[in-house]
Image (cartoon, rainbow, N blue to C red):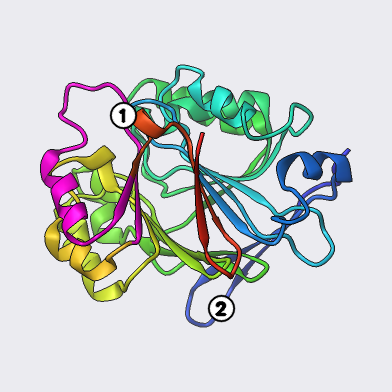
Amino acid sequence: MPEKLKKLLSRHKTKIVILVLALAVLDAGVWRGILGAEDRDGLHVYFLNVGQGDSELVVFPAKGRQAGGAQMLVDGGPPDGRVLAALGAILPPEDRYIDLVLLSHAETDHFGGLIEVLKRYRVGAFVWNGRPGTARAFQDLMRAVEASGARVIVLGAGDAIRYGESRADILFPTPEFLAGKEMNDTALAFRLAGGGARVLFTGDMGPNVEGFLVPLLSRVDVLKVAHHGSKFSSTQGFLDIVRPLLAAIEVGENGYGHPSPDVLARLQKIGARVFRTDRDGTVEVVADGTGIKVFAR
C-alpha cells in the first residue's frame, strides 16, 4: 500500500508557487510494470488516444533509487470511458494512484473523462486555473474532486510544478485573460523540461494567446498542438518561434475540420514530424538525456 503523499507548497519572494511532488512509496513490482529498468530515468509523455479531446500522461524520471517517477495526468478527454481504457493500456491493474491531475480549462472534451478517473484512481492533488465551466457536467467534476479527497490547487502564469530535476513552468493564463469571455483563452499552458527535452502544452489556446506568449517562448522539442489542430491556432509566427521537432495532434472523428490542412502545412513548413492520435493511436515520447524516442501504440 502506498504511504500518504507528501506535498509541500512554498511561496518565494518572486511570488512563484512551486508544487513539490514527493512520490508515494509503492511496491517495486508495481513500478516495474510501468517502466523497465533501462528506461526508469527517462521522462515519458503519453498523448492519449481519447478521440476528439485532450489527455496526456506524464511520468517523471525516477528520483534516486526509486523504481519510477511521479505521474501527472493532464486533462481527461470526453466522458466516454476512453481515458480509462488508455490509462489501462499503460498502467498495470494494481496501479491505482496518480500523483497529480491537472485540468487545463473547463470544457467537456478536456474535463469529462476526469470524472471517471477520480472515481477509479486515488489522486494526490487536483490542479486547475480556478475558472468554473458552464456545462452541467462541470458540477459533477467538482463533486468528484471533493469526494476523492484530493488537495485542490489553483495555478496560473508564473507558477511552477517541480519533481526532482524536472520542472513545468506555467506560462498562462494571466488574470486578464482568465477573466475574459473566451474559455479556450483561459487554459493552463506550460513548458515541461525533463530528460533533456522541452515539451510545450498548449490546451486550446488561440491566436491571441499565442501572440501574447511569443516573447516568452523559445524552441521546444515537442509541441502539443493547440485545439486539436484548429485553423485558428498554431499560427505561423508562433510556430516560427517554438519550431518543434515533434508535433502531437490529439484529435478524433469530428465535424470541425480538425486538423486543419493549413495547420498541417505550417507544421510541415517548419520541419516538424507530426503524430496524430486518430491515425497513430496513443503516442509515447521518451526523453532520457541522450535523445528522444517516439512510439505509437
Looking at the image, the residue that sits furthest to the top is 80
Q: Measuring from the top left, give residue 57's x and y in whole percent.
A: 54, 43
The mark that comes first in sequence, 2 or 1, is: 2
Q: Nearer the viewer, residue 188 or 129?
A: 188
Q: Secondary structure at mark 1?
A: loop
- Any magenta on residue 269? yes
State the image quarter where residue 106 is shown.
Answer: top left
Task: List the residue tagged with mark 1.
Answer: 134
Q: Which residues are magenta?
A: 245-274
Q: Measuring from the top left, give residue 117's x and y in whole percent.
A: 59, 28
Q: Amino acid at mark 2?
A: His
State the image quarter where residue 190 is shown.
Answer: bottom left
Q: Amino acid at mark 1?
A: Thr
Looking at the image, is 17 positioned above or below residue 176? below
State the image quarter where residue 196 is shown.
Answer: bottom right
Q: Nearer the viewer, residue 178 or 123?
A: 123
Q: Which quarter shows the N terminus?
A: top right
Q: Nearer the viewer, residue 38 or 137?
A: 38
- Any magenta on residue 194? no
Residue drawn at x 37%, y 42% as measured from the top left: 105
Task: List the residue tagged with mark 2.
Answer: 12
In the picture, measured across the screen, residue 252 lies left or right of residue 264, that is: right
Residue drawn at x 77%, y 50% as measured from the top left: 5
In the picture, measured across the screen, residue 107 lies left or right of residue 66, that is: left
Q: CA gap, disc 2 to disc 1? A: 34 Å
